[in-house]
Amino acid sequence: MSFRWQCGLLLVASLWPACAAAQDAYPSRPVRLLVGVAPGSTADVSLRILAQKFSQSLGGQFVVENRTGAGTSLAAQMVVQAPKDGYTLMYGGSANTVNATLSPNLTFDFAKDLAPVARIAAVPNILVVHPSLGVTSVPQLIALAKSKPGEIFYASSGVGTSPHLSAELFNLMAGVKLSHVPYQGSSQGINDVLAGRVPVMFAPASTALPHVRSGALIGLASTHALRIKALPDLPTLSEAALPGYETGVWNGLLAPTGTPRPAIERIAKAANEALQSEDFLKALDANGIIPFPGTPDEMADFIRSEIEKWGKVVVAAGMLKR
């Protein structure tokens, strides 16, 4: 063995304890968790629950930062430009996979410039109708919509949001035309549905649950692949009429592409441990949130499939921005 190789091996051997110690010390300073929604929203709630769990399991400080703007793309842009050291993460999700097609002028590629770390949570929408509409099942709604194309209106929390896209996917798969009435948020939309001014909405579960339980609105189906624990008798849309239908808000952690794999795997391990923790799962369930685990590689595949699915819906619905 040459003298140069011997020196190289000695150097690596001398540095290894320091490298291992640095990895074991993570996090040695506060970790920023950026989310592109306002405080109090469902994604914000689930992230803050996760941040507390991370602080307990990893022993560091995890700070949630709400960076709203451009339909969550502002937060994504900030993380893309952040140091690739594991100390700046994004809590991204379904809105970003929609924006990949809906906003073609983005300065970053969500699927390439952000590295998936771990899926965390999913929040289904519930297809609700006002009792005055006179339907109590999804097949009945589809039949009514086919008999009155464009005459039945649905509320959403805004263009490009999950309630909007859920309804457009419903239109596409059911072969109907429900007409869109966008609002500035879910609470404004659900209020008009409760008043009977707009008869239909794909409302976030956390928003719809109390009104379905009280009987003020009729829940026809949920949009997730799994039934909602809080409403076990409510079928999924896939079960009720449209096999393969699945939408809703999902969220997971991402890091700037190029972040060292050991850091990603450490965070992913902590996330998966949290998703097996009884107190964490109870906190999610209390807020109508479904645990949605997944490895970094599974999350990468899922993101690609979501971008492809929503790209087709955005184009079919004529939503593409110029």
Image: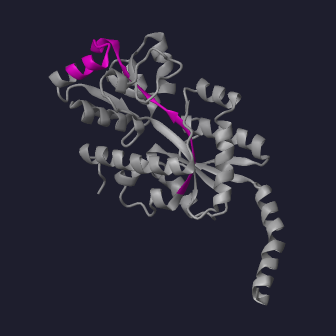
Percent position of residue 130, x then y? 35, 16
137 within the magenta span: yes
Q: Nearer the viewer, residue 184 or 83?
A: 83
From the viewer's perspective, tell me whether residue 302 is left or right of residue 19: left
Q: Nearer the viewer, residue 66 or 270?
A: 270
Q: Residue furthest bottom?
A: 3
Q: Is residue 98 above or below residue 257?
A: above
Residue 169 lies in quadrant: top left
Q: Is residue 68 above or below residue 80?
A: above
Q: Residue furthest left?
A: 147
Q: Is residue 96 visible?
A: no
Percent position of residue 79, x then y? 57, 58
- State which quarter of the image contains the N terminus: bottom right
Q: Nearer the viewer, residue 234 or 317?
A: 234
Residue 142 lies in quadrant: top left
Q: How many marks?
A: 0
